[in-house]
Image (cartoon, rainbow, N blue to C red):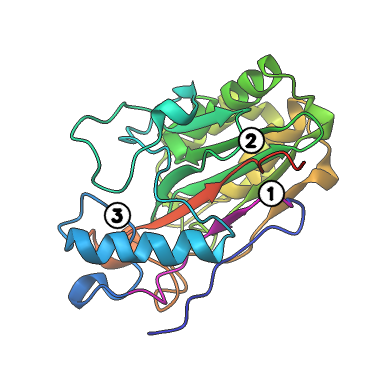
Amino acid sequence: MTELSTVRSSLISYPHGFSTRTGGVSTGIFESLNLGMNRGDDPELVKENYRRFLSSCGIEKEEFVCGEQVHGNNVMVVGKEHARPPYGYDELFMADGYVTAEAGVPLVIFIADCIPLLMADEKAGVVASVHCGWRSTVADIEGNAVKLMQSLGATPGNIRACIGPAIGRCCFEVGSEVIEAVNTLLGTEANDLYELKANGKYMLDLKGALARRLTNIGLDEGNVEIVKDCTMCMPERYWSHRYTKGVRGSQAAVIMKLEALG
C-alpha cells in the first residue's frame, strides 16, 4: 500500500484532511500510514507519516495540538502554546476536542472507527477538531465544541462541518444502553437511526445521530457533510478497531486556520 489518499471536505476551504491507512512508511501490523503515537510503532516512522499526511493537507508544520483521548466531552480552547511535535513531550492533556481562533495551529485527533468531526466558521476565523465516539456524542461533545466556537466569535449558521470516515450503520452493532443514550440526546428524532436485530442488538447510524444533533444546535443542514465511507467495511483503506480486534494503527484528522494574508 503506497498511495497516500487523504479525504477532504467539499465545504471547508481551510487546510484540513482525514487520513486513510495508505501512503506511509510504517511496516508490519502498522502498514503503512499509522498516525497513532501510542500503538507501539517506530517513532521515526510515525514522524515521517505525519510529515506526509500534514503536507497532503496543505500544512507544512512540525508541531500540532493533540492529546490523550478519553471518550469524554471535554473540549479545550487552544493556541500555539499547546502545539507539540510528534513524541515531543511526555505529558498530554486529556481532551477529545479542540477549538482555536489562532492561525497556523493544526488541531489533530485520532480515530479508528469513531467519528472525526471537523468544523470551521471561516467568516469568524474559528476552527474545531472533535473526536466523536458514541460516548462523547451522547455526552454532547459536539454541543460543547459549538459553544466554545461561539465564545470565540463563531455563529452556528456560518459553521461548516464535515463528519469524516467512521464506522457506519452497516457495521455498528450496539446494545440497548447505547440506544437509550441516543434517545436521550435526540428524543423521537432518533427513531429512524437504528434498527433492532434478531439477536437483541441494534444497528446504529452514529453519523446520522451526530449530524442531526448539529442541526438541532443551529448548524444549517446544507452545511453538514457526511463522508459515507465505513471504516469497518473498508479495512484495506482504513484502520478499524473492530475489524482488527485492536491490532492496528490509527487514522488522524486535522484542521488549521490559515495565516492572514498581507
Mark 1, secondary structure of its residue: loop
- Labelled pair 1, 2 in contact (Cβ < 8 Å): yes
Q: Residues within 10 Å of mark 3 (few under 14, many from 20)?
A: many
Q: Earlier in the sequence, mark 3 or mark 2?
A: 3
Residue 222 coordinates in the image, percent (x, y): 84, 47
Q: Earlier in the sequence, mark 1 or mark 2?
A: 1
Q: Earlier in the sequence, mark 1 or mark 3?
A: 1
Q: Provide the residue designation for mark 2.
A: 127
Which residue does the image show at 75% across and 59% down from the upper left? 10
Residue 136 coordinates in the image, percent (x, y): 46, 32
**Front residue of this view, candidates 110 and 199:** 110
The type of residue carrying mark 1 is Tyr
Q: Residue most toward the front? A: 262
Q: Is residue 49 magenta?
A: no
- Labelled pair 1, 3 in contact (Cβ < 8 Å): no
Which residue does the image show at 50% across and 52% down from the upper left? 253
C-alpha distance separating marks 3 and 2: 22 Å
Res. 249 in view: no
Which residue does the image show at 60% across and 49% down from the upper left? 207
Mark 2, secondary structure of its residue: strand
Image quarter (top left, top right, bottom left or bottom right) of the C terminus: top right
Res. 15 in view: yes
Numbered badge on residue 36: 3
Q: Which residues are magenta?
A: 13-24
The type of residue carrying mark 3 is Gly
